[in-house]
Image: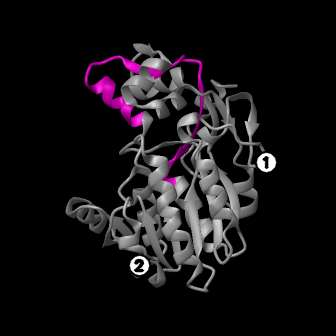
Amino acid sequence: MRVLVLGGTGSIGRAIVRRLGSAGHQVRALARSPEAAERLLVLGAEPVAGDLAAPALWTGAVVPEVDAVVHAACTFDADMGRVDAALLDALLPALAATGRRPALVYTGGCWLWGPSPDRAIDETVPFDPLPAFAWMVPNLQRVLATPGIRGAVVHPAMVHADDGGPLAAMAEQARAGRPVQVVGSPDVLWPLVHADDLAELYRLVLEDDGFAGPVIGVTDEAVRVGDLARRFGGTPDVQVVPEDRAAAERGEWARGFARSQRLSGALARDRLGWSPGHRLSSADRQSAA
C-alpha cells in the first residue's frame, strides 16, 4: 500500500512511519524543511516537500499517487483548528476524486471526552472536548461523512515513548535535577498507550478494508499521574503545577494534563485483533484501581 503520513516527524508519526515501513508498505511523509526530510529518510520514508498550512501546493500532485493518508499532525498553536480545517478542505475532495475509495485515518484523542475517573470511556460515549480541541470534533466528523473515502479515526490515550511524550519528559526533569511536575493533582488518572503499540493499531486500521469509524488506542486504562512521576522520574520529589499556570505557560491545550480519565480499548482488540505489548507492570495498573 502507498501511504502518505502527515506529521511523520512527531512522536506518533515517527512510530507510524517505522511500523508501516517494516510491514512492507511504501511510505511517503510530508516534510516542511530539509531537516525534517533528513529525519524522514532515516526513518525509512520518502520525504514529500510541503507545508501542512499550505495544502493546495501539494495535495493535487501527491494525493493521486497514494492509496491512503494517515493524518497525525497538529501545530499545537492558537491557529491549529483553522489550519486543520483548511487542510481537510483540500485533502478530502482530492482523495474522493481518485475514485478508488482511499483510506484517510485521522487522529483524535482522549481529550475529546470529558473527565471520567470511575467509568471507562468507549467509542459510544458522547464527546465533551477540552475547549482548546473542540475544533477537532467537527473535523473528524467531516472525515467520517465524506463519500468516496474510507474514513477512520484513531483516538490515542496519552502517548508515551522512549524518545518523547510526557513520561520521557518526567525522566528528563529528574535527570536535570528538577522536581517532577504534574498538573492539577497527583491523583489525576491518565490512560496510556505506547507509541509503538499505537502505530500497530494504525497499521491494522489501514489494512482492514472493512473498517471505518472511530477506535480508541489504550493499553493501560488508568494510572495515577503521581505514581508515574515517581516511577519515571525516579524520585519522590513531585511538584504540583496549577492547571491555570500550565495553560498560561504552554497553551490552553495543556489543561488536558489535569483531565482524569479511564479509557477502554476493547473495540481495537475485539474488532481489529490489536494485541499491544508495551503495558506497564501490573503493580502500576493496580495503583489506579
Q: Is residue 118 magenta?
A: no
Q: Is residue 126 above or below residue 289?
A: below
Residue identified by numbered label 2? 62
Residue at position x 77%, y 43% in the image: 125
On the picture, is 32 further left or further right than 180? left
Residue at position x 43%, y 34% in the image: 167
Q: Amino acid at mark 1?
A: Thr
**Residue 23 coordinates in the image, percent (x, y):** 49, 73
Q: Which residues are magenta?
A: 167-196
On the picture, is 22 further left or further right than 107? left
Residue at position x 38%, y 68% in the image: 29
Q: CA distance from mark 2 to mark 1?
A: 35 Å
Out of 242 and 91, give the one closest to the viewer: 91
Answer few, some or many: residues within 10 Å of disc 2's Cα (few below 14, many 20 plus, some between 14 and 19). Answer: some
Answer with the quarter of the image where residue 233 lies. top left
Outermost bottom residue: 99
**Residue 140 coordinates in the image, percent (x, y):** 62, 56
Out of 127 and 194, give the one closest to the viewer: 127
Give me the disc on residue 124.
1
Image depth: mark 2 or mark 1 in front:
2
Q: Are marks 2 and 1 in contact (CB under 8 Å)?
A: no
| Residue 275 visible in image | no
On the picture, is 28 further left or further right than 108? left
**In the structure shown, which secondary structural element does the residue marked by tag 2 occupy?**
helix
Out of 2 and 61, give the one closest to the viewer: 61
Q: Is residue 182 magenta?
A: yes
Where the C terminus falls, by quadrant? top right
Q: Is residue 60 above or below residue 241?
A: below
**Residue 113 coordinates in the image, percent (x, y):** 67, 38
Q: Amino acid at mark 2?
A: Val
